[in-house]
Amino acid sequence: MHALYVLLPALGVLAIAYRYYSAFLATKVWMVDDARTTPAHTKYDGANYYPTSRWVMFGHHFAAITGAGPLVGPMLAAQFGYAPGFIWLVAGCCIAGAVHDSMVLWASTRRGGRSLPDIVKQEISPTIGFVAAITIILILVVALAGLGVAFVNALADSVWGTFTVAMTVPLGMFMGLWMYVWRKGRITEATILGVVGLLLALYLGEPISRSDSWFAH
């Protein structure tokens, strides 16, 4: 089957969900207002609270706030076929993942950057806040364990993949230093260098995987 038969419906579903469902949530439920000052400005300390570019925020959200969806989805597709991964990414994102994460994000923004357990403690009771904190810790442990198993199984026999994934860590550190220390505010430059570095890591992974001096089987 041609990939477009899967890609085009997915893009259509995401576009409709973004245009109508997310707009409904933003305007009717969360009451998003660009005039509100965020904790990055009201609590600025140069470390935990730091105003940054919208594109940097997009990068953080794309990589982190989406959670296990874009990570487990491709793993499911590789191991069990494209249908489970397709449903996980498209339906799960529109109905559950994006809604939950956006809700928590805006709740934290409205409460001065507080964490979810702190919000629960403030709005309900200290006891329920403690229960929420324990619950979140357990959920994180289970999620990280599941992700760990999925990635270990996927990369166990792939030196090429392991090298490429491992290189994202120094590349991310390099991009951060470039944007905030060496060339402050040059986000485009850091992005280009990061993409080129990732492609280079992908290219070098194949010859490195065949090198007995690096990896012995």
Image (tube, rainbow, N blue to C red):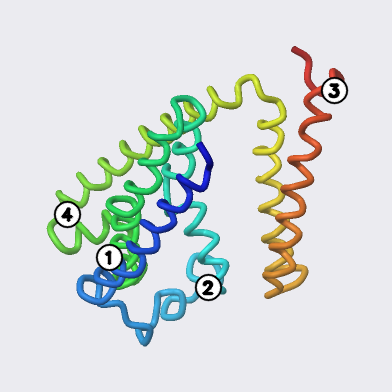
Disc marking residue 54: 2
Q: Residue furthest bottom?
A: 35
Label 3: few (<14), some (14–19) or many (≥20) C-alpha neighbours in 10 Å: few
What's the amino acid at mark 4?
Answer: Pro
What's the amino acid at mark 1?
Answer: Tyr
Would you name the residue on which mark 1 appears?
21
The residue lying at 36 percent from left, 32 percent from top is 142
Question: Percent position (x, y) of residue 18?
Answer: 36, 65
Would you name the residue on which mark 4 appears?
126
What's the amino acid at mark 3?
Answer: Ser
SS for dot 3: loop
Question: 179 above or below 66?
Answer: below
Question: 204 above or below 52?
Answer: above
Residue nearest the viewer, comparing 141 with 84: 84
Q: What is the CA distance from the residue labelled 4 to the residue labelled 1?
A: 34 Å
The residue lying at 86 percent from left, 20 percent from top is 213
The answer to which of marks 2 and 1 sits earlier in the sequence is: 1
Q: Quadrant of the C terminus?
A: top right
Question: Percent position (x, y) of residue 170?
Answer: 71, 47
